[in-house]
């Protein structure tokens, strides 16, 4: 049966500066546990603590640049580019450039505070 999502729900974000997370599909807005889809808007200079999630995260950057620091290297993901993070891989996200970043994050299974496993 179809489930119409009229608008996103704003969920709490981690980091040193305010970041907007608009969850369209996920545990909070649609009570979906299999997948989450959220639009993120992070300001210039935002950074969050490292994490080692128990989910796969697919990130599509729409505008700006999202820096993704992993165990194997650092990736500057610009508007029109994407990155996939596998479960258990230590990662740290930030938006160091002027203008920040706007991106869509899709998590399988859905994001939860228990499975994100943030440090600190």
Image (cartoon, rainbow, N blue to C red):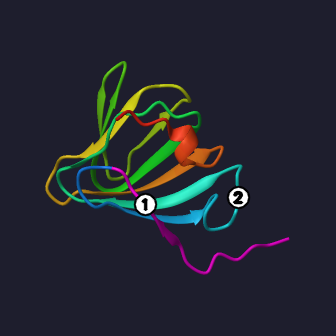
Q: Secondary structure at mark 1?
A: loop
Q: In front: 48, or 89? A: 48
Answer whether residue 8 is magenta in the image.
Answer: yes
Residue 2 in the image: above or below residue 59: below
Q: Residue at the right extreme?
A: 1
> Residue under circle 1?
12
Structural crowding at the residue carrying mark 2, measured as other residues with C-alpha within 10 Å and reported as few (<14), some (14–19) or many (≥20): some
Q: CA distance from mark 1 to mark 2?
A: 18 Å
Q: In front: 71, or 17? A: 17
Structural crowding at the residue carrying mark 1, measured as other residues with C-alpha within 10 Å and reported as few (<14), some (14–19) or many (≥20): few
In the rendered structure, the answer to whether residue 65 lies left or right of residue 106 reads left
In the rendered structure, the answer to whether residue 57 lies left or right of residue 63 reads right
> Residue under circle 2?
32
Q: Residue at the left extreme?
A: 98
Question: In the image, residue 41 lies at what x, y percent?
Answer: 34, 62
Question: In the image, residue 19 lies at what x, y percent?
Answer: 32, 60
Magenta residues (range): 1-14
Q: Residue at x 70, y 77 (%)?
A: 4
Res. 99 image quadrant:
bottom left
Question: In the image, residue 25 lies at what x, y percent?
Answer: 62, 62
Q: Residue at the front extreme?
A: 120
Q: Residue at x 18, y 46 (%)?
A: 96
Res. 32 image quadrant:
bottom right
For the stretch drawn in magenta, what is the main secondary structure? loop
Residue 46 in the image: above or below residue 75: below
Mark 1 or 2, nearer chain start:
1
Answer whether residue 17 is magenta in the image.
Answer: no
1 vs 2, front mark = 1
């Amino acid at each position: 049966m179809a489930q119409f999502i009229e608008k996103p729900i704003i969920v709490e974000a981690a980091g040193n500066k305010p970041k907007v997370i608009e969850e369209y599909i996920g545990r909070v807005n649609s009570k979906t546990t299999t997948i989450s889809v959220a639009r993120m808007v992070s300001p210039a200079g935002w950074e969050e603590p490292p994490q080692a999630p128990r989910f796969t995260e697919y990130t599509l950057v729409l505008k700006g640049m999202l820096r993704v620091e992993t165990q194997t290297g650092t990736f500057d993901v610009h508007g029109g580019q994407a990155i996939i993070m596998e479960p258990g891989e230590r990662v740290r996200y930030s938006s160091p450039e002027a203008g920040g970043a706007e991106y869509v994050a899709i998590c399988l299974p859905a994001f939860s505070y228990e499975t994100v496993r943030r440090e600190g």
